[in-house]
Structures are given as C-alpha cells and as structure tokens.
Amino acid sequence: LVSKEQQVRNRMGMRHPDALKMEVAVNGEKQEKILFGADGAIGDATTFYFGDMRIDLRYGAKLIVLPFAIKLKDFELERYPGSMAPSSYASEVVLIDEAEGIRQDYRIYMNHVLDHKGFRLFQSSYDQDEKGTVLSVNYDFWGTTITYIGYLLLAIGFFGTFFVSSSRFQRLRKELAKLKEARSAVAAAAITLTALLTASAPLQAQETAKAPTQEEMYKLINAVEKTHADRFGRLMTQTDNGRLEPVDSLNNKILRKVYKKSSFIGLNANQVILGMMTNPNVWQAIPMIKLDNPEIAKLLRIPESVKYASYIHFYPPSMQGDYLLEHYVGDARRKPAKERNRLDKALLKVDEAVHITQMVFNGILFKIFPKQNDENNKWYNLYEVFSSMQPGAPQIFTPEEVETIRQLFLNYFNAIDAGVKNEDFAQADAALDKLASFQKFSGASIYPGDFQISLEIAYNHIDIFIKLMIAFLVIGSLLLVTAFITVLKPSLQFPRLIKGTYWLLGALFVIYTAGLIARWIIAGHAPWSNGYEAIVYIGWATLLAGFLVAKNSLMTFAATALLTGITLLVAMMSNFDPQITNLVPVLKSYWLTIHVSMITASYGFLGLAAILGFIGLILFVALNDDNAKRLSLAIKELNIVAEMAILIGLVLLTVGNFLGGVWANESWGRYWGWDAKETWALVSILVYATVAHIRYIPKFYSDFKYSVIIVVSYSSILMTFFGVNFYLSGLHSYAKGDPVPVPTWVYFFVATIVALIIAAAFRKKRFIK
C-alpha cells in the first residue's frame, strides 16, 4: 500500500508536499479536510459533499495558459575552467505564436529576458540532469516602461538639486563660506580623537622567543635563488573555483596564512614555497607556523614563549605521525561559532595553517598541469596526474602524457637540487622554461597574456592597499595634531598646509584609483563583488567625499584621511578574504558596476558625516568659558559639511536602490522581494531621509542633537553592510546567516559612543545657553 503523501510525492517528481489543513462549513455543518500540494505543481482535487452540494478543493499551483508556446531547443551550462562552479547558463528556445504567425529563435540567460505581449520569461534555474530548464514568467505590459521612466525622473530630480542655486545643498555651500574665518577652531579637540582611535587599534604581537639567526637559517635551508624563484612564480595554477592565477599569487596567500607575513627571514614567498616543495624534510623542522595563543604551545609541549612552531611539532615522531591537536581541534569545530572562545578560534586558525603546510609538502595545492583539449579546461596537480594510472582509477591522461609530465617534474626538481648545491640555476631556468612551455601549449585556450600575469605579480608585490592604509593613518593623525596646534596657538597658522594637503591626498587618490583599476583588470570584473573589495571601495568613496564637500577645510581633510585609513584597516582584518575570485552567474552583468558602485559609494559619504559628528561631540566635551563661542562655530561648520555629505550619500543610496530594483526586475522579474539587504537598505534610506529634514524642525534641531543623530544614524549602514552580510541570510549575504560572534571591540566602541554623548550633553548644558 502506498500512502496518500507518497502518491502525491510521486506525481510531483518526488517533491516534499505541503499539507494544508482546512475546516469547511456550510449551513452550520463542518468537515475537516487535508489537502496536499507543492510549489510549482498542480495538486489533485479533493472532492467531498454537503448533502447534494459537491465541493472540489485543490492546493498547489494554478495553471495559466499563455497565448503562445515555448519550445526548448537546447540548454547550455558553462562552468569555470576546471571546476563545477557555474559561469553562466542559457536556454535556446523557439517562440511559437500561431495567432501572430511567429516562430522565432531566442536565447534566454541571466539578465537577458524574452519579452512578448507583456510576458517576460527569465532564466531561473535548471534540472539536475542539465537537460531541462526552469523559466520564471512575469506579466507586466505597461508597468516596466512607466516604472523605469519614473525612476529616471526621480534620479534626474535628485542629482539636479546639487546644481540648482536655491537648493539646500547650494545654500549650505554659501553658509560654509561665511564660516571660513572660524575653520581653524575645528581642530580644538583633534588630539582626543587620535588618542581614541590609537587606543582601539589592534597591536602587533611581538616576537619573544629566541629565534635562529638569518645566517643559521640560510645554512640549514639552502634557499633557492630569488631570481629563479620569481620565475617559478610566473607559472600558472588553477584555483578550486576555476580561476587561473600566477603561482606567485598562491605562494603569497600560503605564506600569509601560515607565517602571517609576506616574507620569511629575508626570503620572499616564492623562495619559501619552492623550498618547501623541493626540500620538505628540512622545511618540516623550520618554525614558521604562527601560534596565536600561548595555550597552543602548551598543547604542543613546547615553551609558551614560542610564537612559531614547526610542522613536526604537530606530528612528533614520538606520536608515530599522529596529529597532536586532532582532539582539541575536533572539540572546537563541533562548538557553535558563537560559543567558541579565543583558544578555540586560535586552534582552528592554526589547524588550517598546518593542513595548508601539509598540502604544500605534498604538492596538492598546485594545479599546474593542464589536460590538452579538455572539455572543461581542467588543470591537475601532480598527485592527480599519477593517480590516473592506478588500476581502477579514471584515466585522465594517457601513459605518454603522464611520462611527459613525470620527466618535466623530475628534471625540474633535480635541476633545483643541483642549482642549490652549485649556486648556479641556469639548468633550473631551462627546465622551468620547458614546464612553462608545456602549460602554454596544453592550456592555450585559457592561458592569460604576459601583461596580465605581470600586472598580477606586480599587484601582489606592491601590496598597494596596505601601503595606502599606513599612509592615510599617518597623514590623518599628523593633520589632526597640526590642526590642534593651530587652535592652541592662533598665531601659528599654516596657510600653505591646506593646499599641500589637497595635492598630497589628490596624489594618493590617483594611486588608490590605479590600484582599483589594476584589480579590475586582473579579476576581469568590477572590484566590489565581495566583502573585501566592497570595503576597499568604500575607502575610495570616502576619500572622494572629502574632496567634494570640503576643498579648503583642514579638519575635513584630516577626518577624511583618517577614516579612509581605518576603512582599509577593517578590510585587512581576517574576516575578509582578499583573494580574487570568479563571479556567480547573476553578477556577470553591467548592473554590478552601476548598482553596487553607487550603493557602496554612499557608505563613504555617510561615513564621513558620521566621523565629523564624532569630532563635533568631542568638541562639545572640550567646551569651557574661554572657547565656547569659538568651538560653537567650529561645531556648526562640521555639521554643515556633514549635512552636505549626507545629502550626496542619501541621493547615491536612493538612486542605487532604484537601480537595484531595475536589476532585480531584469534578473528575476520582480523589483522587490523583502530580502534582508533590500529591507535594511530601505531602513537606511528612511533614517537618512529623516536626518536630512531635521533642520526643518526648529524646536527639535540643535547642533548638539544633530551631531548625536548623524553618529547614531550610521548604525543603520553598519547593519546594512556588516549585520546583513554576517548575521542574516539572503541573496546579498556573504556569510549566509552563519552565527558569527560579535567582536569584543564592538561593545567597547558602543560604550565609548554612549559615554561621549553623555559627557558632551553635560558640557553643552553648562557652557552653551
């Protein structure tokens, strides 16, 4: 016997049916019925009677007959080379409209719809066997055109307010000009902000254990010559998501993961990793795995003062090759993320570093051998090449190909050994050239050009965003101190400093822009597709905001430089992966460039307003009888600049959301789906729309309240970006709702804000009547 539920599942393609329990009443008589149905399926009718009255109830999808037919000719699924990750998928269909005499071919794919008679067909998904396609259908005969025209008119109106002479933005510019004489007073409390920011910055751990000297390490390691190691870095390797990148990129990521630095005892990443591959027995005894917690050293039975452990510390000979931390790491991994303590987190990090090190010794990480004419352009590591010759294993390579790869590998590694002994790498260079030629010939269909390889290697070595972070933090701090001096000593003015600062930050802005362009070229898509890239772009937008809203304000330049540096510092935190990755199909659209850039840029402008409000609160705390009038003017100037930044940010945020609706309509056939990011973006628009109109409530508005509001309001942006990405799930989330613990510094930061507001309120009440 087959249950009713199983019968329904069978008819619905093994979908799990929903059950709807209903109570039906007719003339006081009641019957209870259970209806079965499922999304996308027409449920069976349930028939029952009330006397002579027959009732049919059905639960499920409703069948709608379209005035035309669609025939699927072919479904195409493209994957990134060497991976199962979809690059794009498309449906080749025939539109058949007998009434109109139409029989026409169309191609439907992500962000490219079929429009006919008001019906819009979207590429939604596909069958698991990749032989069938799933299209979603939306009917909107006139609405799309009318909506898009409305969006366009709203956008024109928003941006037009910046240029109309009688607009609020232009009035603010004029009002700011009148306060020019009081600008030097803005820096009265700048040193306080510097102290706060410095106190909250993470400190670099210092090496306390006595380490071998560089000379001793060199003698033990017999390092590979730098010139040859860098040539090795120009080989290409394929990532798990199918991207081809120079080995140099992979080597740098490995060393940063394991050693937490970009070099090791004077050796660059290419020298270190090549040495580990060619001389694993020596490198397994080298202490280079960073221990983030002294408790781990105790677990490894080494002194707590030791900051770096060797590979054999984790697999000691006394344990016969067993992993010493296996039990502890297993316990940490089984805990929910929010319940893990510092030791648990450190254990998981060091476990990752140990296994990465192990894969380097085994050569598993390096997929450097392309399979010629492979349908998916997959590249393989050495283990996969040789495994294909094992009995019963899939034969990926022919015996001749395996022998060719074996000879290339042996010749190269033997030449490395000879080069280290003889201090002559000419033979190794020749063997490496043959290996590179093999890659270019066998993987010619996807092999990148020399310019792109050189650009990515240069990008890796320059480390432009880390250098910019340091530059902006230093410049911002110095500018704040300088501005503070000009306030304490009114006779000390630096008229050339503002102009010099303008050109200095302008030069850094050009370098910053060049870095983003370089990443764009390397990745092949706009550099704001993940968390790391988005934050780096927010830093760029913050710098742009400073130029647009305050050309002659030393205080604003200082705040801009400091906030840009802090933003880049956040991007460098371990929660954000700087790795360049491929795009999912829905993001392969020009809308990524337009919509995301505008939304993310707004965060920079609104962030600048928040830090100006923060400085304003500090100025309130610094009030006394002697400076009350002067600081009041300074606070007013800060609020004017902040309001100008808010007006620009609000326009960018709002228009960006319009464009997001257009993108959603072109991709899925709906403008709004109450996704978590969409909802919080709307909340942020409403919050800042309120902030922008507070000045029109005279009885409520004051400079103090405005400073408080623009600081607190930025929490909606932080929730939209960080909260949604790491604590909520949805189409826009990077972490898919994983319960990531709230960092401890967040609580201290909130407590600081609250304490500052209370202190500012007390001083304002005392000195400003």
Image (cartoon, rainbow, N blue to C red):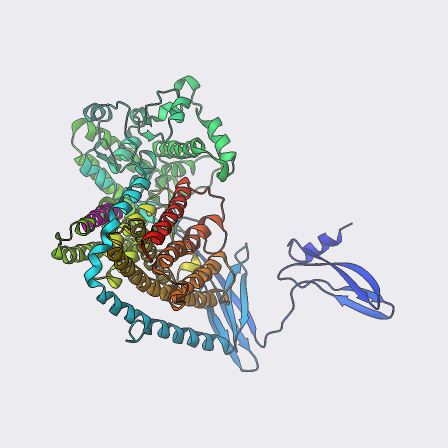
Q: Nearer the viewer, residue 724 or 388?
A: 724
Tell me: residue 424, above or below residue 448. above
State how many labels appear. Answer: 0
Q: Residue at x 78, y 64 (%)?
A: 24
Tell me: residue 29, above or below residue 393. below
Residue 426 falls inside the magenta stretch: no
122 sits left or right of 554 in the view: right
Residue 64 in the image: x percent, y percent?
A: 63, 71
Q: Residue at x 43, y 19 (%)?
A: 319
Q: Nearer the viewer, residue 372 or 446?
A: 446
Q: Nearer the viewer, residue 104 or 204?
A: 204
Residue 632, quarter of the rendered image: bottom left
Residue 422, quarter of the rendered image: top left
Tell me: residue 589, above or below residue 440. below
Tell me: residue 324, above or below residue 556. above
Q: Is residue 538 visible?
A: yes
Prevailing secondary structure of the magenta residues: helix
Find the residue positioned furthest to the bottom: 100
Specify start and end residues of the magenta stretch as a single range: 464-483
Residue 135 in the image: x percent, y percent?
A: 53, 65
Residue 330 in the image: x percent, y percent?
A: 49, 31
Find the residue positioned furthest to the right: 51
Q: Nearer the viewer, residue 631 or 618?
A: 631
Residue 480 falls inside the magenta stretch: yes
Q: Quadrant of the C terminus?
A: bottom left
253 sits left or right of 53 in the view: left
